[in-house]
Image (cartoon, rainbow, N blue to C red):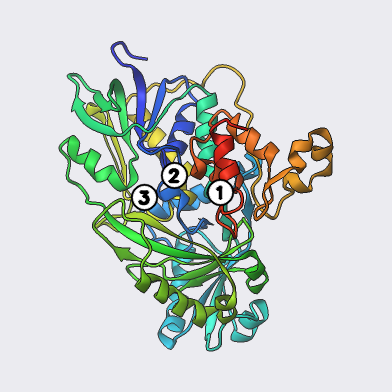
Amino acid sequence: MERGFDCDVLIAGGGVVGCAIARELTLFDLRVTLLEAGPDVGAGTSKANTALLHTGFDAKPGTLEAELVVRGYEQLGRYAERVGIPVERTGALLVAWTEEQLGSLPSIVEQSHANGYEPIRELTVEELYRREPHLGPGALGALEVPDEGIICPFTTPLAFATEALLAGCELQRGVAVSGLERLDGGGVLVRAGGREWRTRFLVNAAGLRADELDRMLGYHGFTVTPRRGELIVFDKLSRPLVSHILLAVPTKITKGVLIAPTVFGNVMLGPTAENIERKDDTSSTAHGLDYLRLEGRRILPDLLEQEVTAVYVGLRAATEHTDYQVSIHADEGYVCVGGIRSTGLSGSMAIAEHVRGLLEDAGLALSPRAGPPVELTMPNIGEAFTRPYADEARIGADPDYGRIVCFCERVTRGEIRDALASPLPPVDLDGLRRRTRAHMGRCQGFFCGAELASILEGRS
């Protein structure tokens, strides 16, 4: 580390992208600090999205987003398999419901080929309904994207952050950046949470607030306009109704409403796409939910007869630009990673790699970190894989893995104990939910909420 600096790189923002950057940089002999304004990593936009593992087939060719999502898809797929992030390769069907949409399918195929994704192909109406017999009437055709998948949006940032933490990253949660100041000769003074850090490089990965940090250093390259996406999660009994991700033909504004399985065994409908003013407004709306029900009844009518488990809202960091806003001001020691929208989960590892390249080109010395690599295995919370409550050998070795606390999601006392003893433990019920699935089932914590709160407070 250069003299006079508290860290080599400070990352502002502990969403999936910021955590991926921290993980990438801790592979090298660097002092890295990660600041997250919220109570936990991955607790903002990263936890409330469609949780798709995108191939990048529909990205705008030639953009940075297209390049990084295509590469990130491969990287995250391999990483997920290695560390135990739940992934299911369901494949996707992009369904045309009008003659206009049907006529646009060949151009989407061309776009996919331009992005390097070749397996996409057109399906006849007969084959479409053979694949998805519960699909609503009136579909005119579809494209099959066999490599699209679903992934756990909770475990991914937690895995990145845990690996970074175990490799020596300083992580501060509940610390919002309040001021930035350029240092003479390069570098940035960061004020946050009543402390100051002098860093050789600042990486702004603040998501919805990336434009605010950018302006603190005098830049005005983009403005984040929160784009509200409302989603409905249906009960696990609805899962047999759909086998693939059902995509809409995209427009210039949105990729449209989709229906997709989740790795937790539910079925998800959404999102809406509404530009709003407040960056903290995650409230659902009557008109948004009515619109989703209308679209859902058209796409998969039987789904609307199922019970709803939850409604949630995510805010995407949309800007006036159609591409990621990633840039470096090398002399000042500042990297901006803004405008990362819904593809940020899929592209996260490639975005991190890209940022590392920018830093290296700017003069940051990268020597591989000494010592053995971090060996990481994340707890499985995916429904398609063996969970502790069903693992007889595990229960035999430790009966707590057979003692269920959350009956809706079959979460055991052993899993909760492990989460609380992990290198990156939860600080609240939301954090516990994202680590174990407790509190996210049919009863939404009505049965288990009091016991979980008691465990968190250390009373049992």
Identified by mark 3, the residue type is: Ile
Pointer 2 local density, CA inside 10 Å: few below 14, some 14–19, many at least 20: many
| Callout 3: SS | loop
Residue 451, image x and y in percent? Answer: 60, 42
Tag 1 near tag 3, CB within 8 Å: no
Residue at the far left in the pictured view: 218
Task: Answer with mark 3 or mark 2, whichever residue precedes in sequence.
Answer: 2
Instruction: Name the residue tied to disc 3.
Output: 340
Instruction: Name the residue tied to disc 2.
Output: 43
Instruction: Tell me, yes or no, if residue 65 can be seen here.
Output: yes
Of residue 398 and residue 298, the one placed in the foreground of this image is 398
Instruction: Name the residue tied to disc 1.
Output: 74
Q: Where does the N terminus fall, quadrant-wise?
A: top left
Residue 26, placed above or below residue 277:
above
Real-space Cα separation, disc 1 to disc 3, in angstroms = 18 Å
Image check: 1 left or right of 298? Answer: left
For the point 61% across and 52% down, the residue is 447
Image check: 165 left or right of 66? Answer: right
Image check: 87 left or right of 25? Answer: right
Residue 102, placed above or below residue 19:
below
Of residue 149 and residue 226, the one placed in the foreground of this image is 226
Task: Please tell me in which quadrant of the rendered image residue 17 appears.
Answer: top left
Q: Where does the C terminus fall, quadrant-wise?
A: top right
| Callout 2: SS | loop
